[in-house]
Amino acid sequence: LPVTWDAFAEVPRDVDVIINMGLGVYDRLDALQLEAGAYDLRAGADAMGHERPGPIGAPEGTAREATLPAPADSPIAGRIAALAGTTVAGYEVRVTPARPENSYLCNETHFRALSALHAPKPEQRLREVYFLHIPVAADGDYQALAEAVAGVLLTLVEAG
């Protein structure tokens, strides 16, 4: 996705699962971070210098809350919890709850994807959405990072 606000304004609903990824683990080189929910806030300038501060907006038919979890009848939370604290190809999988500090484009993207699950359309195939933050590859070892990311992605989609 382009690093611009509203790049994910129209969430694809003709797929079963969406797993968005972004660079976002800065404190460690050996951890992957799954987001548990999203926060109804966006802040900061995008790659074009545009700002869109403020709430993203709760999906139709849901209560306006600061955080948007996966729908209660979805397997998403359980799949994320099952990966929490595991090690995949040498990378620890961390799970981080929705939080106001995470108000940049990754959060907006995940909030919109979760919103599509909370307000489904009749023809919608989409049933699961995830957001995985990855670190910079340690010492340029992209192979190890790719194996870890692939392992997490396969675990999420093969569970269904």
Image (cartoon, grey):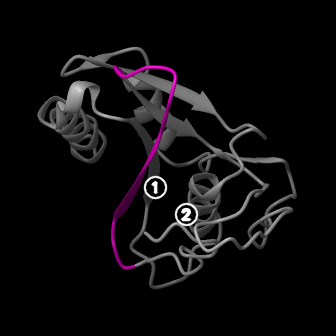
Q: Position of residue 118 (x, y in %)?
A: 64, 63
Q: Which residue is mark 2?
A: 113
Q: Position of residue 33 (x, y in %)?
A: 46, 31
Could you tell me which residue is drawn at 78 percent across and 41 percent down?
100
Label 1: which secondary element: strand
Q: Which residue is mark 1?
A: 129
Q: Position of residue 140 (x, y in %)?
A: 21, 33
**In-image side of 35 versus 53 (left or right):** left
Q: Are marks 2 and 1 in contact (CB under 8 Å)?
A: yes
Could you tell me which residue is drawn at 79 percent across and 55 percent down?
41
Could you tell me which residue is drawn at 51 percent across and 48 percent down?
74
Q: Disc 1 marks which amino acid?
A: Val
CA–CA distance in space, label 2 to label 1: 6 Å
Residue 36, placed above or below residue 42: above
Asked if the magenta segment contains residue 60, the reply would be no
Nearest the camera: 6 or 86? Answer: 6
> Dividing the image into 4 quarters, which one contains the N terminus?
bottom left
**In-image side of 99 versus 140 (left or right):** right
Packing grade of label 2 (10 A; few <14, some 14-19, many >=20) is many
Residue range corresponding to the magenta coloring: 14-30
